[in-house]
Every structure is written in C-alpha cells, then in structure tokens.
Image: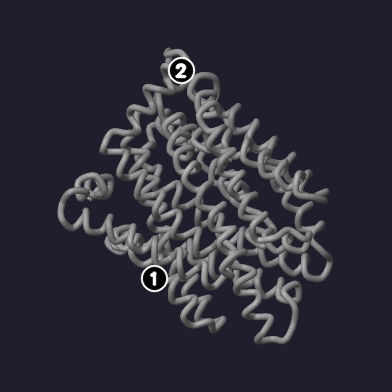
Amino acid sequence: MDLIKKFKLLIALINTGFLGNLLVIYFLSKGFSYAQIGLETSVGVLGAFLFEVPTGVVGDKISRKLSVLIGFTIHALGTVVLLFLRNFPMLLLYVLISSLGAAFVSGSFEAWLFDDLKHIGREKEYRKVMRDAKSITIPLLATALVTGAFLAQFYGFTLPLVLSLIVELSAVVLIISIPEYEFKKTEKAYLGHALSSLGELFQPRLFWLILLSIVVSMQANQFRKFFEPYLGEVLARSLRTTLMGTLGLLGVVEVTVRTVPRLIGVRLRDPWSRRAYSLAPLLLPILTVLSVVYTNPLWIVILGITLTILTAAFGFNLNVEFQHRIPSEKRATLLSLDKMLAGLVMAVFYAVYGFAVDKLGLPEARLTFAVVLLVLGAGFKAGEVMGFLGEHLRLSHLEEGS
C-alpha cells in the first residue's frame, strides 16, 4: 500500500467510531445530569487548551509521527476507562485522557501528512487527498454508527465500545507502518518557539480566520450538543416509547444528519463550496431556531442535514486555507495553538450551556443561545460585506487554483 493510500485509511480509522454522539445517552443512562455532561465537555476542551501547545511543540521539535502514535495509544486508554465508567470522577478522568490523546494527534497529524506530501512533491494535492479520504471515511463511519446504535439498544453499550477500542488499536498499528520523511525542525527553544508561533497567530491573516472558526464552531456545536436526547425525546413522545428505545433510530439519524451529508459538504463544487463557507455564520444559528420553533422529527432531521452540509464545506475550506497560510517549521504548533484558543472559548461555552439547559430546559436554552450566536455571525458577515474583513476571510487557495 502506497503512502497516500495509507494516510487515507488512517484518516478513515481516526474518524470511525461505533457510538459517536450517542455517548451523551450513555452518560445519561449512567445517571449524569445535563450540567455534569456539560461540565465534562468543558473540562475536556479545557484539557485540550492546556495540552495543545506542549504536544504541538513535540510535533515540531521531535517527531510528528511519534506525537500521533502517542496520541492514539492514550486515546485507546481513554476508551478502556469509558468501558468501566462508574461515577463522575471517572467521567472526568476519561475526558482528560481523551483530551491529552487528541492534543498529541491534532496539529501533528495534519502537519505530518502535508509535509510527507511535500517531500514527494505532491503538496498541491493536499485538498484532493483530504477530500478523497472523507469519501472513504463517511461510508465507513455511517456503517459503524448504525451498527453501534442497534447493538447498544439490544445488547447494551459495552459491545460498541469494545469495537471502537479495536478500531483505535488498528490505527496504532497502521501509524507505525507509515514513514515520516525529514521535515524542517525549529531550532528555537521551547518557550521562544511557542511565543513566536503565538505572535504569528495574532497576525490579521490568521487571527480573523481563527475567530470566525470559533464562532462557527459554537454555532454548530450548540445545535449538536444534546441533539440526540432532544430528538430522542421528540421521537419517544411520537412513538410512545422511552429514550433508550429510540437508540437504533437515533443511530440512523446520526448517520443521516452527521455522516452522509459531510460527503456532500466536502465534495461541493468550488462555487457552491465558497457560498456555503460565506453563509455558514448566518445560517447555522437560524437552523437551530427553526428546530425549536417546529418540533416535528422529520423537520429536525432535515435541518440537521442542512447544518452538516454547511459545516462540512465551511470546515474543509477553512482547514485548507489555514494550511496554505502557515509556515512548515511552525505548522504543528500553530495548528495546536489554534485549537488551544478555540478550546478555551469552548470550555466556557459548554459549561455555561450545560447549566443553562438544566436551568431553562433544553428547548429554551437552544433558542436563547441561537439568537446570541446569530448576532455574532451577522457581525462577521457585515464586516465581510463592508470590506473590513473581506481580504482576511477570502479563500485565496481557491483563487490561486482557478
């Protein structure tokens, strides 16, 4: 198997799990409240905030492959903790372990792939490789999620968790088999390298992209957070069953809403992809509002499909644009710093949102937060239209390739 095929398979394994966001229902079944789950998510992204820069520097100064290998080994350990989940401290332990593992992978994986492509003279194919990898990932993930959901409904959550662990260990074996070619290691000291990268991150050409990505992430995650129990309760009322009795259907919905539409999003033709990137900050919170105004299950699923297409196109374009704007010797650290800053914001967001759901109720919290995020998205769109942000937010890699 050649280098690119191995990376495509690794991307598929990285993104394949048997429960996905149905883990929220697993947590609820263990007796955790929405506030505790929101706090767990907050601790997870806060952990990512603390771990991102040290792990990113490991990727830039020692080995990106080693960083990814360590990350996946740690992540598999987190799944083991999840299998034996008993109380809230164990839940926090799981999320901290998972955050540490993800921090080793994030930044370093993209940098490893990009620089390996650069070594063989095919870095301009990065966009195509990522797009093709998504085409493999999405059908595989769809199959795994539906299988895991029905297994959880009829046999409990243990079996799909064990299958997820097997996939993670398979990824570890594949990582070992992929070579890492020479990349330009920074000669700066740890602190100097991190501070230099941080200064670059606040340059307008990167800063406004990062800020936009954080706002859109909040919009998308606000729709998705607690989406499964929200829709599950709607389905349970319609079908006169319990939340646990809807797990199989929710697995199908998970695939329909989150998985298959991603393939559409990443494979949109460039003009449509550009429009999705531009309109996402406005449309995403509107979709959340509409999901509360009219609570028909089919309507909510259609809104979720639309949101996934928009976020997939937005995230794909932003990721490629960001890769083209950053220097190789700082690539892993800059990507980690980006996720670190986003993690700090999202940690606060998830904690506040979780307590708001417990206090206001899930529908009311969804509506309130969506309106606030719509105002933020409108501010970015106004800045783009007026010209202040137009230059910083444009997709220059598409213009160069046209």
What is the image's colouring? Answer: one colour
Other-residue count near label 2 (Cα within 10 Å), few / some / many at <14 / 14–19 / ≥20: few
Identity of the residue furthest to the left in this view: 386
Q: Which residue is mark 2?
A: 191
Identify whether 251 is placed above or below 266. Answer: below
The residue under the point 61% across, 44% down is 44
**Residue 283 picture quarter:** bottom left
Q: Residue furthest front?
A: 359
The residue under label 1 is 286
Could you tell me residue 396's position as x and y percent? 24, 45
Q: Position of residue 56 (x, y in %)?
A: 51, 29
Residue 348: give x, y in percent of width and height.
51, 48
Q: Is residue 169 visible?
A: no
Q: Is 225 or 147 nearer to us in this picture?
A: 225
Mark 2 near mark 1, Cβ–Cβ under 8 Å? no
- Whole-angstrom CA distance, mark 2 to mark 1, is 42 Å
Q: From the viewer's perspective, tell me whether residue 136 is left or right of residue 144.
A: left
Q: Counting residues from the N terminus, which is met first, the one under dot 2 or under dot 1?
A: 2
Say few, some or many: other residues with alpha carbon within 10 Å of mark 1 (under 14 / 14 to 19 / 20 or more): many
Q: Say what amino acid the circle numbered 2 marks.
A: Leu
Looking at the rendering, which quadrant does residue 141 occupy?
bottom right
Q: Amino acid at mark 1?
A: Ile
Secondary element at image label 2:
helix
Q: Tell me residue 394's x, y (percent).
A: 24, 49
